[in-house]
Image: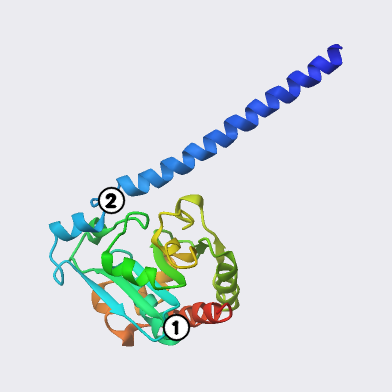
């Protein structure tokens, strides 16, 4: 009887421990998501638009093609996460995909124009997303590690892109929870298929896209300053998309 009771108590304690761990992981996930949102100056596009001047502080770059299925986005382009909108444009051109990029044009502190993906609700983007089957979102994260994080609800597409990027020598890893692009509120998951792919590219890789590793606006706007690696990256993403469409 004592042995049975001891076993019961043991399993009960283990269940409590597992429960505590799961609850802790859940609240860590929620906290990380809230932190990302709370750090932004603007909580939605309307707030940003009312407080800034279009074509002076920021601009949109929109391209609509005959291929309505695929949408390439860079909502933190220009000086916000430098190198992302430049890459998105090349991918769009190579694959003849639709393009939406939001680009910071401020002389400094473009980070203040950052709106997290779950809050980014530009009507122009929403219109394009609603007409698309698949969304591929290009982002950047701060880091000296040569890493590309990949996430999103479309695991098959993510795996296909990962495979092609690795062929080109890029290190691709599964995204951490706070940037995994799987939230139902993330705009990439609001298309017809309800899924998309989110790429997070480290600072060091984005620097390697440009000569002298410079991410300033003058360099980014001069295609003669682009290295082959940005085209290799774009080609890999394009191949990954085409293999699934």
Circles 2 and 1: CB atoms closer than 8 Å: no
Which residue appears at 51% of the width and 61% of the height? 151
Residue 233 at x, y percent in the picture: 48, 78
Specify few, some or many for label 2: CA neighbours under 10 Å numbering under 14, 14-19, or 20 or more: some
- Left or right? Give the position of 96 relative to 214: right
Q: Residue at x 27, y 65 (%)?
A: 123
Q: Is residue 79 left or right of residue 190?
A: left
Query: Which quadrant of the rendered structure holds the C terminus?
Result: bottom right
Q: Is residue 147 left or right of residue 167?
A: left
> Could you tell me residue 50's position as x and y percent?
14, 58
Residue 121 vs 192, above or below: the answer is: above
Q: Which residue is mark 2?
A: 40
Q: Secondary structure at mark 1?
A: helix
Q: For residue 231, which numbered disc appears in the image?
A: 1
Q: Residue at x 42, y 68 (%)?
A: 137
**Looking at the rendering, which quadrant does residue 126 occupy?**
bottom left
The span from disc 2 to disc 1 (Cα, nearest Å) is 31 Å
Task: Residue at 29% x, 77% y: name it.
Answer: 62
Look at the numbered disc 2 and give the secondary structure of its residue.
loop
**Residue 78 placement: quadrant:** bottom left
Asked if residue 234 is positioned above or below residue 174 in the image, the reply reads below
User: Which tag is nearer the camera, tag 2 or tag 1?
Assistant: 2
Between 68 and 178, the residue placed more toward the observer is: 68
| Between 31 and 64, the one nearer to me in the picture | 64
N-terminal of the pair, mark 2 or mark 1, is 2
Examine the rendered structure and indicate whether residue 211 appears above or below residue 102. below
| Image spot of residue 194 (x, y percent) | 48, 63
Q: Is residue 32 visible?
A: yes
x and y, in percent, of residue 210 in the image:
37, 78
């Amino acid at each position: 009887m004592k042995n049975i009771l001891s076993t019961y108590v043991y399993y009960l304690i283990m269940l409590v421990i597992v429960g505590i761990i799961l609850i802790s992981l859940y609240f860590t996930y929620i906290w990380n998501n809230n932190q990302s949102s709370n750090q932004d100056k603007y909580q939605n596009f309307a707030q940003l638009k009312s407080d800034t001047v279009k074509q002076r502080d920021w601009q949109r770059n929109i391209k609509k093609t005959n291929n309505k299925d695929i949408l390439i986005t860079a909502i933190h382009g220009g000086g916000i996460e430098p190198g992302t909108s430049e890459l998105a444009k090349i991918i769009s051109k190579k694959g003849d995909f639709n393009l939406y990029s939001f680009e910071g044009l401020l002389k400094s502190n473009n980070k203040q124009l950052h709106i997290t993906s779950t809050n980014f609700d530009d009507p122009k983007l929403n219109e394009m997303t609603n007409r698309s089957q698949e969304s591929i979102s290009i982002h950047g994260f701060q880091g000296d590690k040569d890493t590309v994080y990949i996430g999103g609800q479309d695991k098959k597409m993510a795996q296909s892109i990962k495979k092609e990027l690795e062929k080109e020598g890029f290190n691709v890893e599964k995204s951490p929870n706070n940037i995994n692009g799987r939230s139902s509120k993330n705009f990439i998951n609001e298309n017809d298929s309800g899924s998309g792919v989110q790429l997070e590219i480290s600072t060091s890789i984005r620097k390697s896209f440009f000569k002298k590793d410079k991410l300033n606006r003058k360099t980014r706007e001069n295609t003669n300053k682009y290295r082959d690696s940005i085209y290799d990256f774009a080609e890999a993403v394009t191949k990954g998309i085409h293999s699934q469409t």
